[in-house]
Image (spheres, rainbow, N blue to C red):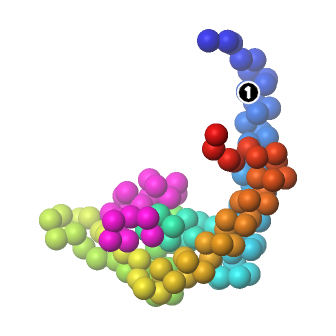
Amino acid sequence: MVPVDDDALAAGWHELMGRYQRLTCALDRELQAGHGLSASEFEVLQQLSHAPDHSLRMSELAESAHVSQSALSRLVSRLEVDGLLQRSACTQDRRSLFVELTALGVTRYDEARPTQRRVLREDTQQAGGCLQRE
């Protein structure tokens, strides 16, 4: 393994964080304007849309959506008020909650998905293809 200079690591980290912040701001702006969603709310809808039966335990959703449990709770509450998802208690473990995408949530995700993909594609093109998998 080739040793990496600590300053080069820090510079790479700084560049990555800057790109993440710019992209998140662009996603927030475009998704909010077009669909009334933040980037984090879209991510929750996306994770649920790909889950079996459009449903996940809150703990699984927190992990896959890359948000803390408390942040997720606030996101889920907002999305539930908007009718995009619903919570239900687990029948085997009453301490666990499931979150399920509603039909309206599926529709909103399907409508917002092209916007999110366009913003990602534009950013990737500007950055020289860094987000594309090889």
In the image, is 124 to the left or to the right of 1? Answer: right
Q: Name the image quarter holding the N terminus.
A: top right
The residue indicated by pointer 1 is 9
Residue drawn 76% across and 52% down? 124
- Give the residue type at disc 1: Leu
How many residues crowd around disc 1 within 10 Å: few (fewer than 14), some, or many (20 or more)? Answer: few
In the image, is 38 to the left or to the right of 84? Answer: right
Residue in front for this viewpoint, 56 or 53: 53
Residue drawn 74% across and 59% down? 121
The picture quadrant where one finds residue 94 is bottom left
Q: Which residues are magenta?
A: 49-68
- Asked whether residue 60 is in view, the answer is yes
Residue drawn 50% across and 58% down? 65
Tell me, yes or no, whether the highlighted magenta stretch contains residue 56. yes
Residue drawn 45% across and 70% down? 49
Tell me, yes or no, whether the highlighted magenta stretch contains residue 64. yes
The picture quadrant where one finds residue 60 is bottom left
Q: Is 17 located above or below residue 94 in the figure?
A: above
The picture quadrant where one finds residue 23 is bottom right
